[in-house]
Amino acid sequence: MARSEPGPASTPWTHWRRFATPPIEIKGLHYRYAASETEALRGVDLRVDEGEFVAVVGANGSGKSTLARLLGGLDKPSAARRAAACGHDLLTERGRWAARRAVGVLFQNPENQIVGENVEEDLAFGLENLAWPSERIRARVDEMVAAFGLGELRRREPHLLSGGQKQRTALAGVLAIPRKVLVLDEPTAMLDPAGRDEVLEAVERERAAGLTIVFVTQEMDEVVRADRVVALERGRVAFEGSPRELFAAPALVRRLSLGLPAAGALALALADLGAPLQPLPLTLDELVAALVGTSSGSGS
């Protein structure tokens, strides 16, 4: 199906139009690194529907980053019954090349993805490689600069940017090419709180615009934003469900070395002091509402 073409009339977050099949459809996915005796992924099944926000979690070595690279067509699966991204077969070289065009991948270190001498040149880089006409490139760069709040930074050199500004630039560069899916591999891991908020706000805008998102993270406060969570353990899917279902299973959370969102951890500390809150609040707003409700109930 044809993609939506960028241009003066498009929104800043123009993505591909709807497909009949799910953007991500994986069945029985295996992957083994050349120097390893054990598989990094062992029979993973994953379906991500259009517009869905799926968080992928797990301890170090569980296979999260490997899965992210495979979804983006950056590596070849060792085997799979089916491995498709945006309808492209990830088991073939041609399919992986096509998937790289449809799936944008953002890694945790933006310095590995910024290639231009300044912000503006970096945003234009991918479009130039696709041989877009210069006037269309200028229009698209202007859109992305406005969308990601980079107006005052557009001619700034990368080494003069903060961590959050670098990651926003890298994200804008990934999405300058209209995408169907965005895969993020721990994009806030190297950022301070301010930079983290900048990136998460940008991701939320893309989500609101309908982009399908696979978000690899070890930050449980980021997990609560997801529609669904997939937890990996030693290369296998150990859990699949909503964030609330995951955090309602404390034994599983401990086994997977995941921890709790800050609000949930504080609620459990209050429970140890004799003030249990049910259901377990996962966000600050839920915690405040639960405490206000408890206080009101005590005073009535």
Image (spheres, rainbow, N blue to C red):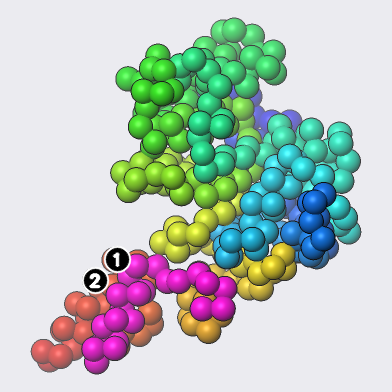
Q: Which residues are magenta?
A: 254-275
Secondary structure at numbered mark 1? helix
Asked whether the viewer can see residue 46, the reply is yes
Asked whether the viewer can see residue 245, the reply is no
Horizontal and vertical percent for residue 105?
62, 40
Task: Tell me: residue 17, above or below residue 10.
Answer: below
Horizontal and vertical percent for residue 116?
53, 18
* x 51%, y 31%: residue: 111
Give the amino acid at mark 1: Leu
Q: Is residue 293 left or right of residue 210?
A: left
Horizontal and vertical percent for residue 74?
73, 39
- In this figure, which residue is indicated by the disc labeled 2? 288
Q: Callout 1: few (<14), some (14-19), or many (20+) C-alpha neighbours within 10 Å?
A: some
Q: Quadrant of residue 148?
A: top left
Task: Tell me: residue 152, above or below residue 259.
Answer: above
Residue nearest the viewer, comparing 108 with 3: 108
Callouts 2 and 1 close, C-beta under 8 Å: yes
Secondary structure at numbered mark 2? helix
Q: Give me the C-alpha separation between circle 2 and circle 1.
A: 6 Å
The C terminus appears in which quarter of the rendering?
A: bottom left
Q: Is residue 191 left or right of residue 173?
A: left
Q: Callout 2: few (<14), some (14-19), or many (20+) C-alpha neighbours within 10 Å?
A: few
Residue nearest the viewer, comparing 6 with 66: 66
Residue nearest the viewer, comparing 166 with 142: 166
Disc number placed over residue 284 in the picture, else none: 1
Q: Is residue 93 left or right of residue 277?
A: right
Residue 260 lies in the magenta-colored region = yes
Q: Quadrant of residue 293?
A: bottom left
* x 52%, y 76%: residue: 253
